[in-house]
């Protein structure tokens, strides 16, 4: 296996773990963490293709990851604020029990 | 596959697995931080110094702390969760395994990825800065705007509204049954 | 002669490395650097603890430790023996793994952070292209350690201390980084070595330190205030306020682990003071051209001890802040001031040099200080101070 393939396999595994967590856990915070893991799997792909790809002198992969890290930070902040607002309303973060749209 | 890469892969995947499977939420958050530290190490291993440090700074210093705060604010730190998985967890795991299978097959069977020796690239901070100020300046501005909006939005969302504050102060159990 | 003395440690390291066989040389070089850093700063830590206790004692009109050794200078040895022989108590309800890991997660990053500080000419463990970013990245890990310690102890006081510590560290990290960004803007590099080298040039015999400019002096003061808050030093020692939380997040630690926390805290203080010196006080360079014969590392450590003395002085002088005062100060004064300082640094960069530049930049800094100070304190001007309980 080439180093690129190893990196891509690690990132696929990371993506699958994040997806499994986001699909199976009940707690909203863990679901958010799963989404973060999937985002990071994407970042790892960008870096791997930049590092082992044919055109490393174009820093496109690096740039994508820098912006994606910024977006992930914003996403985490808003997501957690939403979860806290939900918790204040329903007194739980269990996604199964948050099932009514009425305020 | 070098030893360093092996250790980093174990850190990343073990941390991620623990973050998704452990019963206590705080342990999950700490495992996530471990996984992110491993990723930062992997980026450093791949000569992406700037991104590696940014990863550590943002994910360990900000996102993990934010998650920990959210866990404490939602009262989930005390005991282990019972029934932390959905009843339909088999389906979720199956979907994840399916995705993994498709991705893994694609990666392993692709001929475009195999066997090309490339020179080791260097990403100097100065080059990144130059690019951010020239080609990517619009994206930089937009992300600044996005972060400001996210900051304000998060503050507004997490701030208890005036009526809720007085309501919950006088009748703590009022909105319990919502 | 001065040249030899200046480079004596570098030469010593090269000489030691030359004994190692070829492919081991990078490893041996790294090990020597790490050993030197740990040895130097750990002994500095021992010295500082006794100096701090004696200094505080003098401020409080008592002697301080004076029993062990001449003038009590061997007190750290006695403290060390005591810490090592104490029973290591772990609360029954504690989360053992996290409780065990927390001191390690504190001590390792703070020592790592020292690696990018140039302590002398050619004396830096690793010269990273993104050295400053590295410093802040490993500094961020310490916040997690504080939380781990506080949460895993299962003690209300320690959890309160940890929450206070994280809130405080996150709030003050913003002005800390923003005030460092001014230096990065003007220097055009993130490498600590280059930042120092740019300051080690002399005009009319005076060094070009960043602190000798309007934006630099404002940035330095902001940086040091934020640094005191980051390292949980008085007057920002709410997370471990003895009279409120006993010892805050490390209340449930004893023996060697407690000593590790203590060590981590002091090394963190050295690291952040060292960064302040690197960014604003010219690192290892001498203030005047005629003094540059004195070895560079002596200058660095003299500046470091000077800043530590200021920390001790401040600790003995100022009362602890309240939590709301702390937060208001961070978000309503430090942050806007740091942003204004960023604008001033930009002005300094693009205005033509000369007296006009000085006047404009100083006016903006002082004006912002006065306006913000009045807006935050809610007073129209400096009021006559009344000592309510002392009159």
Image: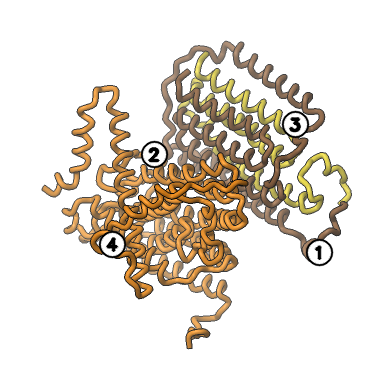
Labels 3 and 4 positioned on one and the same chain:
no
Crowding around mark 4 (Cα neighbors within 10 Å: few <14, some 14 to 19, many 20+) is some
Labels 4 and 2 positioned on one and the same chain:
yes
Element at badge 3?
helix
Element at badge 2?
loop
Shade representing chain A: yellow
Q: Chain of mark 1?
A: B
Shade representing chain C: orange
Mark 2 or mark 3: which is in front? 3
Q: Which residue is mark 1?
A: B163
Q: Which residue is mark 4?
A: C72
Does any portion of residue B126 appear in the rendered image?
yes
Q: Residue at x 66, y 28 (%)?
A: A17
Disc nearer the start of the sequence (4/2): 4
Q: Which residue is mark 3?
A: A23
Q: Which residue is mark 2?
A: C129
Q: x and y percent of residue C347 in the render?
A: 43, 59
Q: Which chain is brown?
A: B
Element at badge 1?
helix
Tell me if residue C104 comes above or below residue A21 in the rendering: below
């Amino acid at each position: 296996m080439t180093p690129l393939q190893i990196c891509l396999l690690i990132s696929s595994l990371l993506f699958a773990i994040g997806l499994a967590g986001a699909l199976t856990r009940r707690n909203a915070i863990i679901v958010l963490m799963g989404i973060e893991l999937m985002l990071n799997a994407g970042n790892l792909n960008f870096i791997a293709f930049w590092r082992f790809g044919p055109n490393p002198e174009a820093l496109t992969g690096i740039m994508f990851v820098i912006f994606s890290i910024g977006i992930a930070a914003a996403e985490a902040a808003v997501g957690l604020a939403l979860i806290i607002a939900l918790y204040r309303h329903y007194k739980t973060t269990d996604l199964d029990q948050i099932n009514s749209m009425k305020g | 596959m070098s030893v360093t890469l092996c250790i980093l892969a174990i850190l990343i995947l073990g941390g991620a697995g623990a973050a998704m499977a452990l019963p206590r939420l705080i342990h999950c958050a700490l495992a996530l931080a471990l996984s992110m530290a491993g990723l930062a190490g992997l980026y450093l291993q791949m000569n992406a110094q700037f991104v590696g440090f940014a990863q550590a700074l943002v994910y360990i210093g900000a996102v993990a702390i934010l998650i920990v705060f959210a866990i404490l604010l939602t009262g989930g730190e005390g005991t282990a969760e019972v029934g932390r998985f959905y009843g339909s967890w088999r389906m979720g795991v199956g979907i994840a395994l399916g995705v993994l299978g498709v991705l893994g097959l694609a990666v392993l069977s692709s001929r475009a990825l195999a066997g090309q020796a490339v020179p080791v690239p260097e990403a100097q901070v100065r080059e990144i800065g130059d690019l951010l100020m020239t080609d990517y300046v619009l994206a930089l501005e937009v992300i600044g705007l996005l972060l400001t909006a996210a900051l304000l939005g998060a503050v507004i969302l997490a701030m208890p509204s005036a009526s809720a504050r007085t309501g919950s102060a006088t009748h703590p159990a009022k909105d319990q049954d919502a | 002669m001065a040249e030899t003395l200046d480079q004596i440690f570098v030469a010593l390291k090269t000489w030691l490395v030359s004994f190692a066989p070829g492919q081991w040389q990078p490893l041996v070089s790294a090990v020597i650097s790490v050993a030197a850093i740990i040895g130097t700063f750990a002994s500095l830590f021992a010295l500082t603890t006794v100096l701090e206790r004696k200094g505080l004692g003098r401020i409080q009109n008592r002697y301080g430790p004076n029993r062990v050794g001449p003038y009590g200078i061997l007190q750290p040895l006695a403290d060390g023996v005591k810490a090592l022989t104490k029973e290591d108590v772990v609360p029954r309800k504690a989360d053992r793994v996290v409780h065990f890991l927390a001191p390690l997660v504190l001590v390792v990053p703070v020592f790592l952070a020292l690696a990018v500080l140039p302590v002398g000419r050619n004396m830096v463990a690793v010269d990273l292209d993104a050295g400053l970013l590295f410093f802040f990245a490993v500094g961020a890990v310490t916040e997690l350690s504080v939380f781990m310690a506080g949460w895993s102890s299962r003690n209300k006081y320690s959890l309160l201390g940890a929450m206070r510590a994280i809130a405080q560290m996150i709030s003050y990290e913003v002005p800390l980084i923003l005030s460092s960004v001014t230096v990065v803007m003007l220097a055009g590099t993130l490498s600590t070595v280059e930042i120092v080298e740019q300051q080690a040039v002399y005009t009319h015999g005076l060094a070009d330190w960043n602190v000798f400019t309007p934006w630099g002096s404002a940035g330095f003061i902001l940086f040091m205030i934020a640094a005191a808050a980051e390292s949980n030093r008085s007057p920002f020692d709410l997370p471990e306020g003895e009279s409120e939380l006993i010892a805050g997040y490390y209340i449930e630690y004893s023996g060697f682990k407690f000593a590790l926390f203590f060590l981590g805290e002091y090394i963190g203080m050295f690291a952040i003071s060292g960064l302040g010196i690197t960014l604003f006080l010219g690192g290892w360079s001498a203030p005047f051209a005629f003094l540059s014969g004195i070895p560079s590392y002596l200058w660095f450590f003299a500046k470091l001890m000077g800043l530590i003395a200021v920390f001790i002085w401040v600790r003995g002088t100022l009362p602890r802040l309240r939590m709301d005062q702390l937060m208001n100060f961070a978000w309503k004064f430090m942050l806007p001031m740091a942003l204004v300082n960023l604008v001033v640094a930009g002005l300094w960069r693009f205005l033509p040099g000369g007296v006009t530049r000085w006047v404009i930049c100083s006016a903006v800094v002082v004006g912002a200080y006065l306006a913000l100070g009045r807006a935050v304190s809610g007073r129209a001007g400096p009021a006559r101070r009344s000592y309510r309980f002392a009159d």
